[in-house]
Image (cartoon, rainbow, N blue to C red):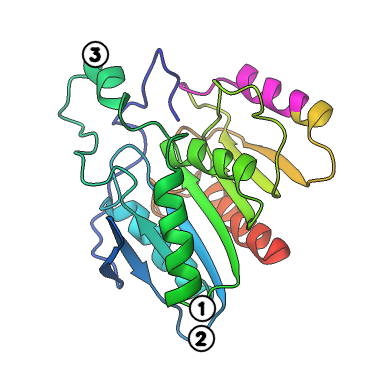
Amino acid sequence: MANEAKPCPCDMGYMMEYGGVGQEVQIEHIKAYLVKPPSDSDKAVIIIQDIYGWKLPNTRYMADMLASNGYIAVCPDFYVGKEPWSPSHDWSTFQQWLEDKKPTNINKEVDAVLRFLKSQCGAQHIGAVGFCWGGVATHYLALQYPEVRAGVSVYGIIREREDRYELKSPTLFIFGEKDDVIPLDQVSVLEKNLQEKCTGVDYHVKVFPGQTHGFVHRKREDINTTDQPCIQEARTDMLNWLQKYM
């Protein structure tokens, strides 16, 4: 997620015009966007939203992409009906808005989604992919939920927990070199501490040159010839990581 002192600016990346091919469903106390793959699968991925919420077309685009690669993809409303952030909001109020939407306070929702995937979708192998706020949440799941077999945390780092380096499931961390809200020194600290404290669980920290916050899911593949290779490589890395551990 964005640095607490400098929230994720709304002008990084691009808002897509995209409708999605899945459907909205009710999972216990929360709504979710659900997409099923073309053929039956026992593999599922929880897609975790950024600050703009579960209805963001960009995030649904990623869910559809994962489904097209053979995964049951579900993007729950982790804000549980609360209003997501909007580019029109006053950034000085961001911390107040965030107060009841902590990405490390999602156990009730995660538990409900896991029950749904297992009982209603037949999922036996479950992973998680998250962006920005969702990147922090994915990092949190890797610390708390060994049954989530693989995680891909995209531009998100947990800062406030003591146990944030003792991963219980394999996790890929993706960052952009030019991310103004997650400076490279924070990425270096993450990697150093993982090397020292994360034993027995695979992880990888990868920084993409020249890329800004949001590049993986807030840009179309064809946005320009300069960014296209990094966007495609990051998405391929995500798919390869999930395939390897699920």
Q: Look at the numbered discs 1 and 2 and tell me whether their residues touch, using CB distance below 8 Å.
A: yes
Sequence-first disc among 2 and 3: 2
Where in the figure is residue 133, as x and y percent of width and height? 42, 36
Helix, strand or loop status at disc 1: loop
The one of 24 and 37 positioned closer to us in this rendering: 24
Question: Is residue 214 visible from the viewing direction of this image?
Answer: no
Where in the figure is residue 2, as x and y percent of width and height? 43, 25
Magenta: main secondary structure: helix
The residue at 52%/68% (across/down) is 44
Query: Mark 1 or mark 2, which is nearer to you?
Result: 1
Q: Residues within 10 Å of mark 1 (few under 14, many from 20)?
A: some
Left-right relation of 102 to 165: left
Q: Residues within 10 Å of mark 2 (few under 14, many from 20)?
A: few
Q: Which residue is mark 1?
A: 122
The one of 229 and 77 positioned closer to us in this rendering: 77
Q: Residues within 10 Å of mark 3 (few under 14, many from 20)?
A: few
The residue at 41%/57% (across/down) is 112
Q: Is residue 126 magenta?
A: no
Query: Mark 3 or mark 1, which is nearer to you?
Result: 1
Helix, strand or loop status at disc 2: loop
Where in the figure is residue 131, as x and y percent of width and height? 45, 43
Query: Mark 2 or mark 3, which is nearer to you?
Result: 2
Q: Which residue is mark 3?
A: 92
Left-right relation of 209 to 89: right
